[in-house]
Amino acid sequence: DQQVKQNSPSLSVQEGRISILNCDYTNSMFDYFLWYKKYPAEGPTFLISISSIKDKNEDGRFTVFLNKSAKHLSLHIVPSQPGDSAVYFCAAIMKTSYDKVIFGPGTSLSVIP
Amino acid sequence: DVKVTQSSRYLVKRTGEKVFLECVQDMDHENMFWYRQDPGLGLRLIYFSYDVKMKEKGDIPEGYSVSREKKERFSLILESASTNQTSMYLCASSYRAGVGTQYFGPGTRLLVL
């Protein structure tokens, strides 16, 4: 049973618009969340993270929002660019096991020029 | 810059063969990981190691073993390859004290015939 879910396998967005990627989790023991980005034929790269004590973290065009009561987080990309086209993985970590990262299945984002 | 390298980008093996996948990192990271990536399932942890000669089972260790004789090198071994082990294999490393920020290699796409 997946503890980290990304219910949209794919998403298409026009260049310049906002991309919103969603992630839900089931384990209330998760206390740190990350987003990774993966291009074809490359390994995933770390994008942005958020601690459970925060509800928002921003880094340039990327913002992650965390709603603990709903066990939901989202990644916003504004404005979207064609180079953002990639697979985005949501991931979570438990306080008791900082080394072990639980990944979601990924969402493939296509930004259309 | 952290560099994680994997010995092969593509491999084709026959059922029953013994397969070695090698991973090397150059950042003196304590932790190293092996994942497999399959469509719709995301990244699933096979094994990880937090020190030389130490190993821990991940979520799907069956059919795999690992070896870590040196800090910078972590090997994944398929003792007798089967067709259901056809997948993308990703190696990653991180600092022991780090909170989940893993650095990934480019991946090895393995096809077992």
Image (spheres, coloured by chain):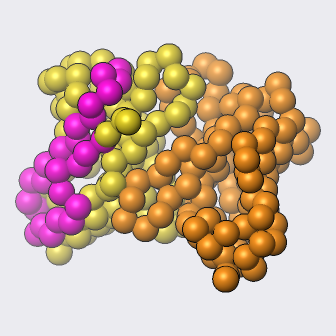
Name the residue at the bottom extreme.
Answer: A113
Viewer-proximal residue among B80 and A17? A17
Q: Position of residue B103 (x, y in %)?
A: 42, 39
Is-magenta flag for residue B13? yes
Q: Provide the letter of the chain coloured yellow.
A: B
Residue at x-position 67% and y-position 69%: A81
Name the residue at the left extreme.
Answer: B17
Residue at x-position 23% and y-position 22%: B71
Quadrant in the picture for the C terminus of chain A: bottom right
**Can residue B97 be seen by looking at this rendering?**
yes
Residue at x-position 61% and y-position 19%: A96
Count all numbered tags in the image, as a single digit: 0
What range of the chain is rendered magenta? B4-30
Residue at x-position 82% and y-position 25%: A53
Q: Is residue A18 left or right of residue B62?
A: right
Viewer-proximal residue among B10 and A105? B10
Q: Position of residue A101 (x, y in %)?
A: 54, 37
Q: Position of residue A10 (x, y in %)?
A: 65, 74
Name the residue at the right extreme.
Answer: A69
Is-magenta flag for residue A47? no
Where is residue A26, by image quadrant? top right
**Can residue B33 be seen by looking at this rendering?**
no
Q: Is residue B80 left or right of residue B44?
A: left
Q: Provide the letter of the chain coloured orange.
A: A
Q: Is residue B33 left or right of residue B20?
A: right
Above or below, comparing residue A48 to residue B85 in the picture: above
Where is residue B2, by image quadrant? top left
Above or below, comparing residue A97 to residue A56 in the picture: above
Q: Is residue A110 left or right of residue A22?
A: left
Viewer-proximal residue among A110 and A68? A110
